[in-house]
Amino acid sequence: MTILVTAASGHLGRHALDALVSAGVEPADIVAGARTPSKLADASARGIRVVELDYDRPETLTPALDGVDRVLFISSSDVRDRVTGHRNVVEAVRAAGVDKLVYTSAPKATTVDYGIGADHRATEEAIAAAGIPAVIVRNDWYHENYLGDVAGARESGVIAAAVGDGRVASASRADYAEGAVAVLLADGRIGDVLEFAGDVAWDYTQLAAAASEVVGREVVYVPQTREEKAAQLSSFGLDAGIVAFVVGIDDAIANGVLADTDGTLSRILGRPTTPLVEGLRAGLVAA
């Protein structure tokens, strides 16, 4: 069985390659796709086949899928136009006739109307319309998303956000990658939609406490209004589109979109998900 990992040079993709090898898949049976293959020289040295794969260049997709049986389709990080590239991938996978696709989506993508979910909803709909045998894994937030906040708090002693008392059931990227790989390698589950999340839903006061433990100084959570958050982001030189995107994430957290956890991910992993403090500490060391 030959397995393709798309966006394999990204953080989640690299963890997925590691998880495949750890699960006993021979490196020669793994194909790692990346927009810039040279970024995967280390994977090539391990015996993994590296191919050019650019969501926005359909001519790279068909060759990358040649001989592939299963695909881990990692969603694009392009927040400006994710859907066009995703639809290119879906069409290429449909034409290739793969046995199974696992797509990394976003929480509640088809049931809650929020900014980051819209692109994933469109992609899930495209996968279904194409008739691809697929499993959707909807990843909640990554611990690593907060490394910048924690690093900044080392100097400021503050984590500020417009999330109110919203909660986040985050886990580490490695947890999500291992879960997706387990689903990809297992037989069955075609048609399933799995909401992946960490075992604990924490609020931002608890995030500040975790940051305090990691950086070795008191860190406090300072609630912001949407307007204050937008002004802060604009002061960093971010354009209006990115500001709206980030504020929209805070809105989603405030509205509980990232708060649910039912243990699905840890059951698939066969172990608890990585605790917040542990994930933050490891991420700062690796950064």
Image (cartoon, rainbow, N blue to C red):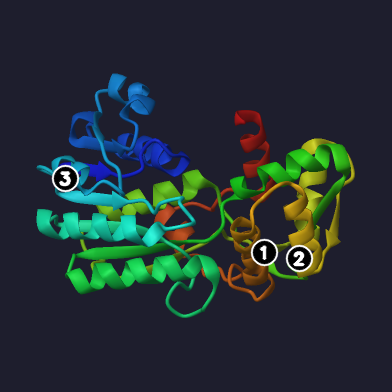
- Within-10-Å neighbours for mark 1: few <14, some 14–19, many 20+: many
Residue under pointer 1:
247
Question: On residue 147, which mark appears?
Answer: none
Q: Residue at x 19, y 60 (%)?
A: 91
Q: Point out the tag, 1 or 2, that comes first from the N-terminus.
A: 2
Residues at marks 1 and 2, CA–CA distance in whole angstroms: 8 Å
Side of 169 where 217 appears, left or right: right
Tell me the amino acid under the disc marked 3.
Leu
Badge 2 or badge 3: first in the primary sequence: 3
Label 1 SS = helix
Q: Is residue 49 above or below residue 194?
A: above
**Residue hosting label 3:** 65
How far, Cα to Cα, is label 1 from label 3?
A: 37 Å
Task: Quarter of the image for the C terminus: give it.
Answer: top right
Amino acid carrying mark 2 in the image = Ala
The residue that label 2 is drawn on is 162
24 w.r.t. 275: above or below: above
